[in-house]
Structure formats: C-alpha cells, structure tokens
C-alpha cells in the first residue's frame, strides 16, 4: 500500500478572505478527483482548522495499492484538470509518498 499526502500552504500576502476563497477552490477542484478513479482506495481532502504560521492550509490524503496506481492517478485526466484549475492559486506544496 502507498500513502500519498500533499500539503498546500498559501503564499503571502494573503488576507483571511483570500485564504478562505483559495482553500474553498482547492477543495472544489481536488475534492472529487478520488471518486472519479476506481483504483483509488481512499481519498480525502481537508481544510486546516488552525491558522498558524507553521501550518499548512489544505491537504490531500490518498491511499493506493501500488506505486503504479499512484502514478496512474498523477497522470490521470481528473488529476491534471485539478492541477490546472488550481494553478492560479499562489501556494507552496510539500508531498510525501510512503509504503505501509
């Protein structure tokens, strides 16, 4: 099994209103992706409930049976479309993929 976690941190300057709008957009575009692909075992997205300097703003938490399925997801049309739709949001990204 492979766990895929992506954390987005909006980059300053970012007002509370801009943050709220941007994380809603991320949830809107990435939220449905996992339901569109039958080989995704688990797929959750979430908006951070804390607003700390050291915290991320949005997370994707997905589980796949194999690295090959993770790569299929990353190259899938729904994922690519979500990446393009979110490209206008100024953000940093950190990713971790691990076997468990």
Image: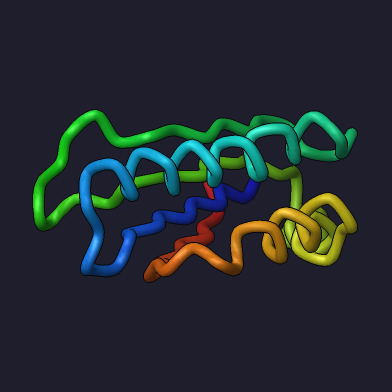
Residue 21 found in image quarter:
top left
Seen in the picture, residue 3 relative to 35 is either above or below; the reply is below
Q: Which residue is drawn at 79% across and 55% down?
A: 73
> Quick check: 83 left or right of 80?
left
Q: Residue at x 48, y 37 (%)?
A: 24
Instruction: Locate the N terminus and report the quarter of the image it occupies.
Output: top right
Residue 42 found in image quarter:
top right
Q: Depth check: 88 or 92 in front?
A: 88
> Quick check: 33 left or right of 17?
right
Q: Depth check: 12 or 51 in front?
A: 12
Residue 80 x, y percent position in the rendering: 79, 62
Residue 38 x, y percent position in the rendering: 89, 34
Seen in the picture, residue 32 relative to 58 is either above or below; the reply is above
Seen in the picture, residue 92 relative to 8 is either above or below; the reply is below
Residue farthest left in this picture: 53
Residue 63 x, y percent position in the rendering: 63, 40
Q: Which residue is drawn at 69% across and 58% down?
A: 85
Q: Which residue is drawn at 22% across and 44% down?
A: 16
Q: Depth check: 63 or 1 in front?
A: 63
Image color mode: rainbow
Seen in the picture, residue 73 relative to 95 is either above or below; the reply is above
Residue 12 found in image quarter:
bottom left
Residue 100 x, y percent position in the rendering: 53, 46
> Quick check: 39 left or right of 43?
right
**Number of marks drawn:** 0
Q: Depth check: 58 or 66 in front?
A: 58
């Amino acid at each position: 099994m492979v766990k895929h976690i992506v954390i987005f941190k909006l980059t300053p300057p970012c007002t509370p209103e801009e943050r709220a709008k941007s994380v809603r957009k991320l949830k809107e575009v990435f939220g449905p992706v996992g339901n569109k692909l039958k080989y995704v075992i688990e797929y959750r997205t979430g908006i951070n409930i804390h607003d700390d300097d050291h915290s991320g703003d949005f997370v994707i938490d997905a589980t796949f049976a194999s690295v090959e399925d993770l790569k299929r997801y990353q190259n899938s049309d729904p994922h690519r479309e979500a990446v393009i739709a979110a490209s206008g949001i100024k953000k940093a990204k950190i990713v971790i993929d691990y076997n468990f």
